[in-house]
Image (cartoon, helix red, strand yellow):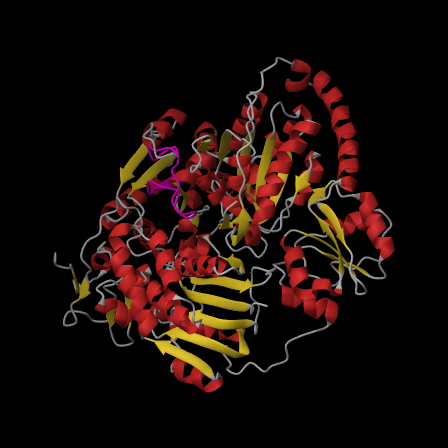
């Protein structure tokens, strides 16, 4: 078998391939996105982007009931969206295997919260596995499908950013031949009405008992005994940090199955050690179970933080009291931060410039455009979750009335709108709201690295397909005022925003301009400053373009970055920014 | 036993640090090392500060590097080298591209780009190497090959057979850009 370096997400896709999966449906979200992108490497697997995680999970449930091994992948907050099917999928169980991948983001590298998905396994009463490197990603996916079919249950596999996005060496195997199972009508199992569900709940509880026995026996819950040192109970990437920090100076209970937790193994390990630490990122999930089991002296969150990521150095410090004491030689307290920014030529920049100038309240959403909250634009006032901009704007409307609403807009990207903005818009129309919703249509799902979505006219596989028409959709839900414009036509856009916010009717403005990073985006020669005309008024700096540089006594345009969008020239009051010439 | 080497690659989103770390990791694997690398996707790519870790050794556990544990910091940009130098071991090596890219707080005049970064670093660390990769890339007519020039530099420093890297580059870049990238690699390797 050939050895390869793979990120965890790629290894998950490989594992799915080897397990004979034929249907995958997901919604992108960092750090889970590449799982589904890598699925496209396997022609045996049908893979798709769904409009949101709930749909993705239902597609996977349907495929499983339909007899095919199926998988869906999402980030932790995506699982909240899919929680409804999750809980009842647990009751109906599976026909062919069903695996749900959820990628947590401790440290919030690219997320709005730091929730711990292990709670979901417990709440939905289904098993959860947790790999610690890329090889385990392959192995655990295959095992997850076996467990799924043996126990008639969906299986969750939990990742974290450092597992998803770390590369390590894997050995790949062959694809297992899995035959499509028959679809057998079985309403007692698949139709969850109260009478049937009551029986299935009993089945679920019995299944949990059998899974507990399995958890106590499975080799993926592994005790590694070494002489002396403390005992460590750990899971996920924290296991790797512990191994690096403590090596054979500690004994380990490595938990590959984090739900249900192996009661017997926990007790056995606890009683064999003098001192036991529970080393787990985020919540005290394992620690609390230990305490319920009466293993009351385990040391967990009294020592280790709930917030943020761990690392090997932290474990050395907390458990061995070892720190590196070399003096750091240069004080670098005054290093300016380098926050992510909207790219040169980004269509969102012109839009925010106008909204800020008009002093509007901006109810924001999740995507690249969330960066509009940062300096110098500082033009966004709220951001909660996917789709919330539209419905929150309506809530503010109902709370504060028409005059305030006339100074407020919701901004939401095309993919986010399809994900869960549509229902909010229906609410506005239905309940006689007057909010103005701006759909930022940049023809792609940008933040997660350019995924197709139902409005782009292409599938995950790159095949042409229908594209959702935002104008017709808005009209169909009952919005009478729908306008389309170019966000770089500042005057035109400003006029439309003024008109639409001032009416006491709901309205939708669709700004259309492709993401500047798309191959279809037009690139023009770089603009330059006419130093004779420039009065250094700094207006151009207000648009927050990374290619315009403040020299202290003037400005200059970085020709390596400028894509010639011309936005700076259109805000310059002295016509001091000239168009570049075609080379 | 193989020496364990921890390399931290830092730069600005868009500079191509990922490609450098991936090629480096693949070459290390070819040489028989266990390898782990950690990348951060998403937010960091929008012109933000980007960090990747490459660790090789007989057996590597943690994919990440902590303060004062890196053997080498390979900085694609001065300010980023300055930001992350604390991750170097006491006797570690700083390899820095002397390119400056202003972050947003500097662009809009809310902060100053620190001065004399290379001087400060050479004073504090015994092992520092500076290379003007952006000028070298301009000589080749493409500023995007800074990452491959840096790869050439690190290949030379690690004393790894350059043919292994050339082979890895052949697999990683599209055919029409191959000659340019090979040339860029050699530029870093010899400069």
Residue A412 percent across, percent down from the top left: 41, 42
Residue A63: in sight, yes or no? yes
Is residue A240 toward the left or the right of residue A407 in the image?
A: right
Q: Which residues are magenta?
A: A434-460
Q: Is residue B71 left or right of residue B185?
A: right
What type of secondary structure mainly makes up the magenta span?
A: loop
Q: Answer with left or right where residue A97 lies relative to residue A536.
A: right
- Residue B116 percent location from the top left of the image: 38, 83
Q: Residue furthest top?
A: A185
Q: Position of residue A3 (x, y in %)?
A: 51, 49
Q: Is residue A441 magenta?
A: yes
Rendered location of residue B40, percent (x, y)? 48, 56
Q: Where, quadrant-wise, is the C terminus of chain A in this rendering?
A: bottom left
As drawn, A143 above or below A267: above
Q: As rendered, which of B107 and B40 lies closer to the eye?
A: B40
Front residue of this view, candidates B60 and A275: B60
Residue B65 left/right relative to B73: right
Residue A545 within the magenta-colored segment of the rendering: no
């Amino acid at each position: 078998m050939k050895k390869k370096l793979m990120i965890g997400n790629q290894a998950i896709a490989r594992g799915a391939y080897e397990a004979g999966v034929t249907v995958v449906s997901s919604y992108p979200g960092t750090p889970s996105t590449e799982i589904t992108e890598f699925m496209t490497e396997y022609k045996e697997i049908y893979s798709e982007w769904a409009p949101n995680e709930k749909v993705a999970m239902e597609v996977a449930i349907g495929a499983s009931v339909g007899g095919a091994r199926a998988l869906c992948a999402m980030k932790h907050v995506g699982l909240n969206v899919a929680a409804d099917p999750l809980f009842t999928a647990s009751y109906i169980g599976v026909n062919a295997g069903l695996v749900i991948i959820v990628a947590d983001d401790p440290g919030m590298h690219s997320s709005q919260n730091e929730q711990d998905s292990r709670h979901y396994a417990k709440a939905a009463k289904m098993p959860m596995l947790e790999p610690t490197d890329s090889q385990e990603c392959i192995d655990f996916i295959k095992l997850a499908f076996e467990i799924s079919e043996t126990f008639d249950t969906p299986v969750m596999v939990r990742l974290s950013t450092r597992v998803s996005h770390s590369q390590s060496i894997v050995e790949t195997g062959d694809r297992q031949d899995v035959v499509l199972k028959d679809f057998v009508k079985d309403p007692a199992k698949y139709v969850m009405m109260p009478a049937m569900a009551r029986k299935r709940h009993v089945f679920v509880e019995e299944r949990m008992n059998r899974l507990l026995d399995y958890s106590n026996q499975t080799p993926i819950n592994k005790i590694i005994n070494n002489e002396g040192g403390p005992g460590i109970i750990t899971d996920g990437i924290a296991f790797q940090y512990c191994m690096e920090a403590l090596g054979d100076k500690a004994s380990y209970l490595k938990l590959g199955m984090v739900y249900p937790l192996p009661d017997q193994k926990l007790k056995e390990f606890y009683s064999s050690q003098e001192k036991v630490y529970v080393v787990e990122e985020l919540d005290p999930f394992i620690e609390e179970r230990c305490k319920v089991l009466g293993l009351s002296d385990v040391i967990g969150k009294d020592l280790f933080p709930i917030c943020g990521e761990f690392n090997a150095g932290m474990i050395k410090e907390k458990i061995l009291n070892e720190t590196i004491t070399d003096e750091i030689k240069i004080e670098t307290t005054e290093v300016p931060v380098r926050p992510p920014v909207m790219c040169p030529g980004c269509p969102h920049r012109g839009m925010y410039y106008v909204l800020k100038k008009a002093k509007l309240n901006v109810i924001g959403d999740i995507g690249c455009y969330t960066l509009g909250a940062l300096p110098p634009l500082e033009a966004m006032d709220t951001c909660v979750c996917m789709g919330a901009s539209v419905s929150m704007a309506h809530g503010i409307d109902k709370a504060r009335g028409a005059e305030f609403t006339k100074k407020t807009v919701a901004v939401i990207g095309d993919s986010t709108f399809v994900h869960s903005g549509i229902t909010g818009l229906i609410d506005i129309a239905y309940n006689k709201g007057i909010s103005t919703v701006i759909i930022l249509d940049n023809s792609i799902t940008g933040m997660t690295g350019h995924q197709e979505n139902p409005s782009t006219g292409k599938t995950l596989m790159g095949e042409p397909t229908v594209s959702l028409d935002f104008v017709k959709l808005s009209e169909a839900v009952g919005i009478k005022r729908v306008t389309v414009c170019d966000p770089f036509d500042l005057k035109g856009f400003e006029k439309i925003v003024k008109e639409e916010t001032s009416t006491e009717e709901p309205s939708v403005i669709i700004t259309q301009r492709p993401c500047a990073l798309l191959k279809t985006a037009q690139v023009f020669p770089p603009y330059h400053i006419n130093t004779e005309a420039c009065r250094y008024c700094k207006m151009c700096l207000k648009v927050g373009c990374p290619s315009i540089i403040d020299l202290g006594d003037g400005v200059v345009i970085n020709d390596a970055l400028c894509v010639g969008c011309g936005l700076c020239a259109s805000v310059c009051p002295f016509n001091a920014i000239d168009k570049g010439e075609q080379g | 036993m193989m020496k364990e080497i921890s390399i931290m690659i830092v730069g600005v989103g868009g500079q191509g640090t990922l490609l450098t770390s991936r090629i480096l990791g693949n070459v290390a694997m070819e040489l028989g090392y266990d390898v782990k690398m950690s990348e951060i996707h998403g937010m960091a790519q929008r012109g933000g500060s980007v960090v990747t870790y490459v660790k090789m050794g007989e057996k590597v556990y943690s994919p990440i590097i902590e303060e004062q544990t890196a053997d080498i910091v390979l900085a694609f940009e001065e300010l980023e080298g300055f930001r992350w130098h604390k991750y170097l071991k006491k006797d570690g090596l700083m390899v820095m591209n002397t390119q400056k890219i202003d972050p947003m707080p500097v662009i809009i005049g809310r902060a100053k780009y620190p001065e004399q970064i290379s001087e400060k670093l050479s004073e504090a660390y015994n092992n520092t190497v500076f290379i003007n990769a952006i000028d070298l890339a301009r000589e080749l007519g493409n500023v995007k090959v800074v990452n491959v020039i840096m790869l050439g530099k690190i290949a030379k420093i690690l004393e790894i057979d350059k043919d292994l890297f050339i082979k890895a580059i052949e697999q990683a870049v599209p055919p029409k850009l191959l000659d340019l990238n090979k040339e860029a690699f050699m530029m870093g390797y010899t400069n």
